[in-house]
């Protein structure tokens, strides 16, 4: 084989690679929609005719955490990731009185799915996104096609000793106990939640926790304290969630950063108690597993959704 033939083959292969990359490129749209007096910001990609996947972020984050996952999923799925009220780019309209509770967050997101025409959808829940997603599932079990829980707790045994101060505030919501919760919203504490349990912190993009902190400063720390105080109401609803799992047995993948300082591996394993076919996978990282193990999560999620979600 002469050099011209080799060069032609290389150029042909490179051109094919570029063409494939271009044909598979996904555009992510950034929009807002008025839901109950709340301007809900969301990211959306993929064909509206494809099976839908709703991504729900948690504390110290926003839909920004899904920036790399969305294009991977959108090759085959209609992917929508809203910012929850109190986070990211979502804002309550001037003059609208909005109580920051998980019931109200879920009400807004439920109405959001209706406005977006999501009749059936899979959910990815993380951290605060879990109690929001659990409410959607319990209320509309027929709409949920599959569940991916990435450090999204649903069992008492999943709560670590890191909740001690918060539990005290639940039991006695005094001004002093409420003030104790302010510490969880400092830049150092938010950064710690990203870095704790992470073997190689150079994999973490600093913009992630910086943007989360900037949103808290912009929207107000009292909002976050209200939600921390209200989190105890989620535990009271666990039994309803477990009944949903037992009755409907939804396809479920729990993929967990096993060194999470707040949600223990026991919380992931517990899913099997009520949903024996649940798939449980652990990653050697912390709470924000998607920031360090995004490729692994995307691969596992695509394999899971491809096997369980039908058009």
Image: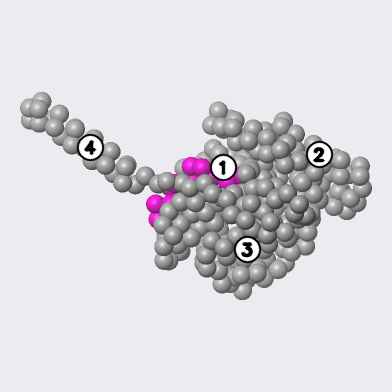
Count how many numbered circles sit on residues in the image.
4
Depth check, front residue: 71 or 99: 99
Q: Are marks 2 and 4 in contact (CB under 8 Å)?
A: no
What numbered label is drawn on residue 15? Answer: 4
Q: Residue at x 67, y 47 (%)?
A: 91
Among the two numbered marks 1 and 4 on one chain, the one whose residue lies closer to the N terminus:
4
Q: Check disc 4: other Cα within 10 Å, few if <14, some if 14-19, many if 20+.
A: few
- The residue that label 3 is drawn on is 111
Task: Judge whether residue 69 is colored magenta.
Answer: yes
Residue 224 is left or right of residue 285, and the answer is: right
Residue 91 visible in the picture: yes
- The residue that label 2 is drawn on is 182
Image quarter where the C terminus lies is bottom left
Q: Residue furthest bottom?
A: 247
Residue 4, percent across and down? Answer: 9, 27
Among the two numbered marks 3 and 4 on one chain, the one whose residue lies closer to the N terminus:
4
- The residue that label 1 is drawn on is 64
Q: Which residues are magenta?
A: 62-76
Q: Check disc 3: other Cα within 10 Å, few if <14, some if 14-19, many if 20+.
A: few
Residue 41, percent across and down? Answer: 59, 49
Residue 150, percent across and down? Answer: 59, 50
Establish if 194 lies above or below 41: above
Residue 100 is left or right of residue 71, and the answer is: right
Q: Residue furthest top?
A: 3
Q: Check disc 2: other Cα within 10 Å, few if <14, some if 14-19, many if 20+.
A: some
């Amino acid at each position: 084989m002469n050099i011209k033939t080799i060069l032609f083959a290389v150029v042909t292969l490179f051109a094919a690679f570029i063409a494939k990359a271009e044909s598979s490129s996904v555009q992510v749209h950034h929009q807002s929609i008025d839901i109950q007096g709340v301007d809900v910001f969301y990211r959306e990609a993929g064909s509206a005719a494809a099976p839908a996947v709703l991504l729900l972020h948690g504390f110290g984050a926003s839909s920004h955490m899904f920036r790399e996952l969305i294009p991977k999923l959108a090759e085959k799925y209609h992917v929508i990731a809203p910012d929850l009220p109190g986070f990211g780019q979502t804002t309550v309209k001037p003059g609208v009185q909005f109580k920051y509770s998980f019931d109200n967050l879920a009400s807004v997101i439920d109405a959001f799915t209706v406005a977006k025409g999501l009749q059936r959808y899979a959910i990815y829940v993380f951290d605060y996104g879990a109690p929001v997603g659990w409410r959607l599932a319990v209320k509309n079990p027929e709409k949920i096609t599959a569940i991916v829980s990435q450090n999204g707790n649903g069992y008492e045994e999943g709560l670590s000793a890191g909740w001690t101060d918060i539990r005290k505030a639940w039991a006695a919501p005094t001004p002093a106990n409420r003030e104790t919760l302010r510490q969880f919203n400092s830049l150092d504490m938010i950064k710690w939640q990203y870095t704790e349990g992470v073997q190689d912190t150079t994999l973490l993009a600093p913009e992630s926790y910086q943007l989360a902190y900037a949103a808290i400063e912009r929207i107000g720390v009292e909002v976050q304290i209200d939600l921390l105080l209200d989190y105890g109401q989620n535990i009271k609803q666990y039994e309803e969630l477990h009944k949903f799992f037992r009755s409907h047995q939804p396809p479920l993948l729990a993929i967990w950063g096993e060194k999470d300082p707040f949600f223990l591996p026991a919380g992931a394993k517990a899913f099997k108690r009520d949903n024996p076919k649940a798939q449980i996978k652990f990653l050697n990282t912390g709470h924000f597993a998607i920031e360090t193990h995004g490729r692994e999560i995307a691969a596992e999620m695509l394999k899971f959704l491809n096997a369980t979600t039908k058009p």
